[in-house]
Amino acid sequence: MADAGTARRRVLAARYREVRAATEELAAPLSPEDQTVQSMPDASPTKWHRGHTSWFFETFLLQGQPRYSPYDPAFAYIFNSYYEAVGPRYPRPERGILSRPGVAEVAAYRHHVDSAMGELLEGELDEATADLVELGLHHEQQHQELLLMDIKHALSRNPLLPAYRPGAGAHPSEARKLGWLEHEGGLAEIGHRPGTGFAFDNELPCHLEHLTPFALADRPVTCGEWLGFMEDGGYSRPELWLSDGWAAVAQGAWTCPLYWFQETTSAPASSWFVFTLGGPRPVDPAEPVCHISYFEADAFARWAGCRLPTEAEWEVAARGSSPASGNWLDLRVLHPLPTGDSATGLFGDVWEWTASPYGPYPGFRPAPGAVGEYNGKFMVNQYVLRGGSCATPAGHVRATYRNFFPAHARWAFSGLRLAKDA
């Protein structure tokens, strides 16, 4: 048992260094001004993500260590996100007005936490502490994707349309013909099975669900197919939309996915452009459509004579697919890849909306203490997405992973895959 504990500690120490370095690599192309801006209340500045992920390790792992001294006690207020049991927190919509601490001081804070975590990981770890370290690493990987989502939105609001990483994202190809993966239905085991690796608490407990026969598309919906929806008046046909979705279309003046634009209002339908982390470029009809809301995904599915899959259907279908085959976070790409003949599986490229509201599995219990606020308190008024995206770090997602966003959200790397009754 001691040897197993030592081996796990060494693995965690190596992973800690790797994950923390990856966050800094993502922030490296951004100026101090870039890292301070906040473009909407749902987004956060890059430097806040860097500080908050350090606060997580400091709060849940280092504060109880006898020799640890906080870098700055005020950071407990500034970098707390939503952990009410820990203490008060700075208002989320106002993070962009925090000119101080600056980027250099946030870097110093990260170094301070990393040094203390290095000492912690050199000693003996009990199982509960090791589990918290692992949770913190997966938490930071979530914020790596959020960092990219948020800076993409911020840069898109700049009239210069600056690139986060110039040249990333262009891989023209042709989409393959849509096929279907059929499943006979019946009783299916859903959720994470204990003893098979890390999972968030919202993936538990493992339970049975009854599925009727269904079929799932073998690839996501493409931009070319979405153009067909737009050209057929998809955004102006109320019969396709849920009531709240139709209100969102009107309120937001939606006529296309987020980040799509035309240079002139009289431009032909074929002249759509999309803002990417590599800058603006023409829409590729073969790549998965991205940055759509649940409302848009539902309307498209209805227009196509299909429906969205439930999360249980998606999970069962994904068991025959390897996450390793997905298009994950790659600084050379940073965008969904075209669904050509080489594209396989259900992982990567875009998070896929499901028809399932985000709620607890039968028997779900939040973890005790403040860390129990991680997922359970958000199980209302949101929908589940599955599969990961081109901004998700490799190795972070599994078939049971449950992401979630409100139905109107569009700034995530979200798309859809069609389903139908078999």
Image: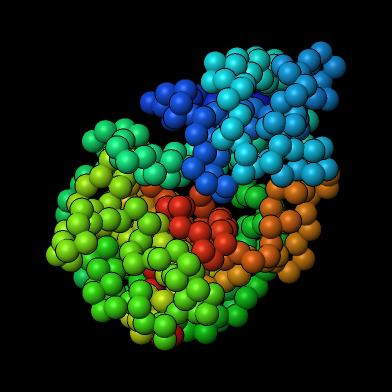
User: Which residue appears at 23% of the width and 74% of the height?
Assistant: 231
Residue 221 to residue 303: above or below: above
Q: Residue 343, position in %: x, y?
A: 27, 56
Q: Residue at x 29, y 68 (%)?
A: 226
**At which x and y percent is residue 363?**
77, 66
Q: In front: 114, or 244?
A: 244
Q: Position of residue 116 (x, y in %)?
A: 69, 16
Question: What's the image's color scheme?
Answer: rainbow
> Residue drawn 60% across and 64% down?
382
Considering only vertical position in the picture, is 232 above or below 271? below
Q: Number of numbered discs present?
A: 0
Kindly give the residue lying farthest to the front in the view shown: 265
Q: Quadrant of residue 72?
A: top right
> Taking 114 as reference, is 235 left or right?
left
Q: Residue at x 81, y 13 (%)?
A: 67
The reply to whether residue 177 is in sight is yes
Q: Is residue 134 above or below residue 113?
A: below
| Left or right: 292 as drawn, with respect to 227 | right
The answer to which quarter of the image holds residue 308 is bottom left
Quarter of the image containing the N terminus?
top right
